[in-house]
Amino acid sequence: MRYKKMITAAAVAGASALALAGCSGTSGDSGGSKTVTMWIYPVIADEAAHKSLWDKTVKAFEAEHKDITVKYEIYPWANRDESLSTAIAAGKGPDLVYLIPDQLSTYAKSIEPMNEYLPKDQQSDILDNVKDSITVDGKLLGAPILTSSNALMCDKKAFDAAGITDYPSTWDDLTALAPKFKEKGIYITQYYGSPDVTLNMTFYPLLWQAGGSVYSKDGSKVAFDSKAGAKALQLISDFAKKGYIEKDLISTMPSLEQTAIATNKVACTWQSLPTDVKTFWGGDENIVIKPPLKDEESVAYGTVGSLAMLKGAKDKTAAGEFAAFATNAENSKAYDLAAGYFSPLKSTGELYADDPVQSAIEKTIPTVRVGELQPSARAVMGALAPEIQAALLGTKTPEQALKDAAAAAQPLIK
């Protein structure tokens, strides 16, 4: 879930290899008559710290539920979808699994809604935009444990080098500043154009900020081939044409240390996080967090991590009890602080009041959208991404690129 894990689309490989890579944990054999199984992923990069936190949560739960034993597996991010879909098809899936919103929509037919299992007060405690991101047809498909925001992040060193003190808040601001930074050899922003990069972190925020959407309201048609879509793609295409963004990133995806952002040559970005740039930028004192850019709206991409229950769960009541426990205010707060994420709940309050960077990001959480809650979301993204790249390379106009993408994407909606 860190940046390097989120930016690439999930690779597809053998499920057996993934299973071998996992590691299991439990607080011990409690002798319980019910067993809850769970698959999770390394949200906390430190494996020992991650396992220790879950062991503590499981132990506390089992102490209160003498008849339930919880067993979990920690899998790597890569290949997780093939492993899960294979397990579900074989009837060997876990009772609970950590999923992000686009996975919730993808596996919706295999998910048992949480409406009956999360206490009503816990449901009402969920932030409104978080609840929207995990609800499909009125069904709560997960118990949220974390959320995030890719707010606008600017490099103070780059601004100092350019002699600029005013930070952008709108597209017009960004456009006006771009030539001034170029004169100093600094790009106004970074933009990854490779089709391997998720549009959630690149194009979609611009589309949303322009007032557009990927789908029509009823989800039956693609809607990105609109005036808003053309305006968003024109903005970044103009930046590419005028040399305001790093040309190599349109076609390739080098490691971060090989890009301009690592040498203080990018003014602002919504595609990287503080943890990615802190070393390169010289610490938090050079990281300036601003609200997401605005055209018609100020919108950021973020994610929500939830524990989802599969319909094949052996004991749904027991699984629901653990999901509710693990994601309650106390446990989610501990988890979020350890992982560096943000709370999906209202009652936890501000987690990072003493951290200027994290506190500034935390304030943008209400602006977050998580992407599209449609089963075809990833397939549609696959059709759209290469057309966006074509516009950035100048081989198609933004309007033609979006028209061609819509023609390819519409048949993918079922």
Image (cartoon, rainbow, N blue to C red):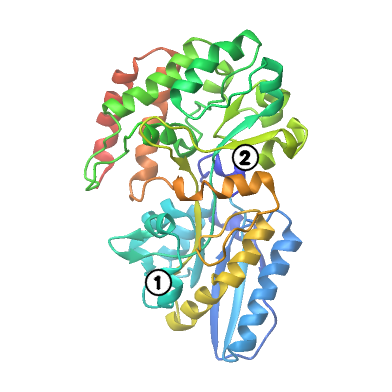
Question: At numbered mark 2, what does the secondary structure look like: helix, strand or loop?
Answer: loop
The three-letter code of the residue at mark 2 reads: Leu
Kindly identify which residue carries mark 2: 273
Residue 60 appears in which quarter of the rendering? bottom right
Eye-nearest disc, 2 or 1? 2
Asked if residue 390 shows in the view, the reply is no
Count residues near mark 1 (Cα–Cα under 10 Å), then give few for <14, some for 14-19, many for 20+: many
278 or 41: nearer the eye? 278
Mark number, residue 114: 1
The three-letter code of the residue at mark 1 reads: Met
Report the residue at 44% width, 48% height from top: 370
Residue 243 appears in which quarter of the rendering? top right
Q: Is residue 107 left or right of residue 16?
A: left
Mark number, residue 88: none
414 or 274: nearer the eye? 274
Q: Is residue 226 left or right of residue 151?
A: left
Query: Which of pointers 2 and 1 lies earlier in the amino acid sequence?
Result: 1
Residue 265 x, y percent position in the rendering: 67, 20
87 or 235: nearer the eye? 235
The correct choice, above or below, for 361 with respect to 173 in the image is: below
Residue 177 x, y percent position in the rendering: 54, 17
